Image (cartoon, rainbow, N blue to C red):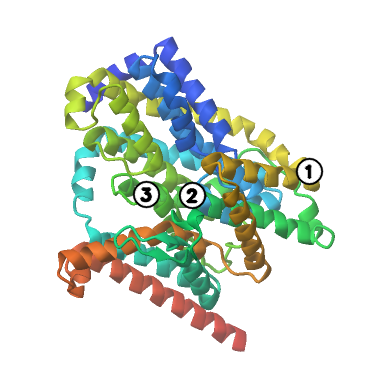
Amino acid sequence: MEALGLLFEGFAHAFTPLNLLFVMIGCLLGTAVGVLPGLGSSMAVALLLPMTFALDPTAAFIMFAGVYFGGLFGDSTMAILMNTPGQASAIASTFEGHKMARAGRAPQALATAAIGAFIGGMVSCILVVFLAPALADFSANFGPAEFFALALFAFVATSSVVADSVLKGLASLVLGLGIATVGIDSVSGTERFSFGVPQLFDGISLVTVTVAVLALGEVFHIASRIRRDPAARAMRPAGRPFLSRAEFREALPAWLRGTGIGLPFGVVPVGGADVPTFIAYGTERSLDRRRKDPQFGKGAIRGLAAPEAAGNATTGTAMGALLALGLPVSATAAIMLAAFQQYGLQPGPLLFERAPELVWGLLASFFLAMIVLLILNLPFAPLWAKLLLIPRPYLYGGIAVFCGLGVYATSSSTFDLFMLLTIGLLGFVMRRYKVPLAPLLIGMVLGPLAETSLRDALLSSGGDYGVFVAGPIPVVIYVLLAIALAISIAGRIRARARQDV
């Protein structure tokens, strides 16, 4: 009850006219930046950081929180409409969300994303207020062996369970892991696959790969088929701007499962919302295979609902981890940690005692930001969907320009523009031969985590591989993986048996 009383005091601070204004400004700025390819909430916070030192700390961080949540909404909007995620946390939403848009269901897809983000964000905010200590204790149980098991689960599930072809899925995964290893090894200092090119010593940026494979690859694919494929020429948004009862009932279990998957990842330092969104998507894909009429690949609403809820659930608890533990689990949280330090504040347990007005006002602003974003995004879903009415040559030409601008803004390197073009052509070839993109991206995102965790676990155990099955958490993860593989294999055998009959 003490937490509830403090939260009400926080609402009293957040409900001042000035702070409400900063919540709205943050939500609008975050959404606006999120719709630009290659940009996202982390860049928006970084750009705003020097401009906020003249503000009161509470007002500045309330605006940052609005930018953080708003960036996720903007990322999802472009991921759904243009197959162009602003950052890695929106990648999983492209797989089914863009198919919904191509089928003329863009308003319903945007509504699904907005409601899922609202549910995941609200549940996580409530959890942060009341259960932050328990979540912090849970995160303390994760060591290198647990992180490696988690990464292995994502690798195998994405490449063999989620992908239609195991061989193509594994090939895509290996390609992603190969891209992740380019550069100088952080432990030994050895050059790996850089071929003596200095620009590759720091590796290949995830932003470049994401924008190239998903956005530029899609541009090339559409351009190659625009004269032969009528569907590539026009995507007419149609129907209701809101979900029907049947669609809401279809999406609700996925929203809840995605929220449950995303919540623990806010306090587990695995890079933010990237991992849980892929896991949520993979979970729904594996469940869809057991249905009589599988919908994945046709614009499945559950394939969009789960990643959206998971991503925003992770964001809420990530902010709780930053405030309670001083633990930044994402790029945006790390930038906000730097902002706290610029104001002479150190996030952690003592922050709740030394600056309670700031902490509880900020927590209250999370709830306000979610409500503001729902109000902003639901009514404007049909308006955003009208972007699809722009003639294809102009639309995809504009996307190609923004891809280049987004990548150049993150690195100021012309070499990265050539990398963008090269990897974009790779993305086009993968689409041409129906090689799945998800394993490549999950390999790129989780490859460094898996490698570092493998090394740390072996170093801590003196080279004993038994460390990977020594704790209960890795064993549970491996058992879940075995069950998922068994279900997938059984489903494939049944499908072949039906084809033979």
Of labels 1 and 2, earlier in sequence is: 2
Check the image and name the residue furthest to the top.
Answer: 17
Which residue is at the front of the view, 250 or 261?
Answer: 261
* Amino acid identity at mark 2: Ala
Residue 302 visible? The answer is: no
- How far apart are the two marked residues, 1 and 2, measured between alpha carbons? 26 Å
Q: Position of residue 59 (x, y in %)?
A: 38, 17
Judging by the rendered image, the residue that carries numbered circle 1 is: 394
Locate the N terminus and report the quarter of the image it occupies: top left
Residue occupied by mark 2: 88
Q: Are marks 3 and 2 in contact (CB under 8 Å)?
A: yes
Evaluate if marks 1 and 2 touch, with contact meaning CB atoms under 8 Å apart: no
**Amino acid tagged 3:** Gly
Relative to 338, is 175 above or below? below
Residue located at (80% from left, 47% from top):
393
Q: Disc 3 versus disc 2: distance between alpha carbons?
A: 10 Å
Quadrant showing the C terminus:
bottom right
- How many numbered markers are drawn? 3
**Residue 20 is at least partly visible in this image:** yes
On residue 271, the disc is 3
- The answer to which of 132 and 142 lies nearer the viewer is 142
Q: Position of residue 408 (x, y in %)?
A: 58, 42
Q: Residue at x 23, y 49 (%)?
A: 139
